Amino acid sequence: MAEQVANAAPGDTAVDLSPPTQPLTRPSESGSGDWSALKGDLNEAPATEDGSADAPKSGSDDSVAVQPEAGVSLRPGVSSDSFETNLAGASARSSDRDAAFRHRRSSLTLKVGMVGDAACGKTSVMVRYCEGQFDEDYIMTLGVNFLERSVSLRRTDIVFSVWDLGGQSEFRAMLPLVTSDAAAMLFIFDLTRKATLMSIRDWYQQVRLLNRTAVPILVGNKYDLFVGLDPERQHQMVKKARKYARAMHAPLVFCSASHSIHVQRIFKLVLVQLFDLRPAFEPQRDPSLGPLCEW
């Protein structure tokens, strides 16, 4: 059955984002969609939006519960056939081993793909998040770019591998490079250009043909320019964006790469969606448009 937005206002056209076959599910090595190994609170400090919040920080220790690696117990056991022989030694070594386990760190790489029409600011979002910089000059992405940024959640080092596809039609053939093995896909549009939002349906359907498990997030960029538009135009864009987000079963984020607004929270939401975390931040609100981040 086609995924449509319920309760559309009279005259509105429901957004049809029908998948080729099955709906999206969370990725899992076992195929069961169980990501319980990383359940917990996302306790990363809320980002300040003062232009420096999205600069990469090293040495942070944001918390999330992490299960030990497969085959490793939290307390070393003793096999039954050598219990008496090893009991004393095991007791003597237990504190040292417990200390070692407390300091054991695991690592995880998450690939995040970015798609959307040309000049929507995909590269700017990627560079702002990964490098804490913004280039005023527009440079067209030729093919595919990627950058990485590491964050720490308790004893887990998470590497975001962010892949950006050029929005021109000639680069569509490279879409599989971006979607392959991606845990999340960011669908980015320009809040000042309605046509870029309308294109999201096509991008979404193409991505789902290639990757049915990636978590989708809808991102409206250039919020700093958007607030200068006519109020009626703003309301129409927000209304349509929310309709698309509901049809995609995706969070919706309004951001500004140039002013460092909500860029970090896009990637926090990736973790929230993938690992069923409880976000420790409240979204900023526009006085007339409501929250700038919905999930």
Image (cartoon, helix red, strand yellow):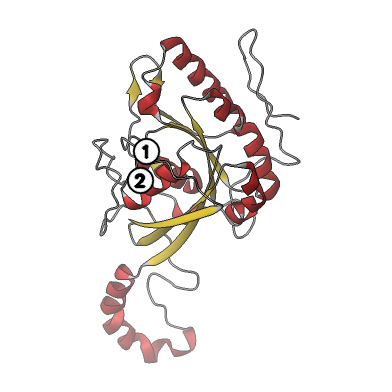
Circle 2: element type: helix
Residue at position x 30%, y 73% from top?
98
Above or below 216: residue 236: above
User: Of label 2 and label 1, which has the lower sequence position?
Assistant: 2
Q: Percent position (x, y) of residue 121? A: 45, 39
Q: Residues within 10 Å of mark 2 (few under 14, many from 20)?
A: many
Amino acid type shown at disc 1: Ala
Amino acid type shown at disc 2: Arg
Residue 201 shows which numbered tag?
Answer: none
Residue at position x 23%, y 36% from top?
50
Residue under pointer 1: 257
Whether pointer 2 and pointer 1 mark residues with C-beta atoms closer than 8 Å, the reply is yes
Above or below 236: residue 215: below
Above or below 291: residue 277: below
Image quadrant in which the N terminus is located: top right
Residue 128 shows which numbered tag?
Answer: 2
Residue at position x 31%, y 35% from top?
259
Q: Is residue 134 visible?
A: yes
Circle 1: element type: loop
Return the residue nearer the eye: 219 or 117.
117
Is 59 positioned to the left or the right of 81 in the image?
left
Q: Percent position (x, y) of residue 31? A: 64, 55
Q: Percent position (x, y) of residue 163? A: 51, 52
Q: Percent position (x, y) of residue 143? A: 56, 52
Above or below 186: residue 197: above
Residue at position x 63%, y 13% from top?
12
Cα gap from disc 2 to disc 1, whole angstroms: 6 Å
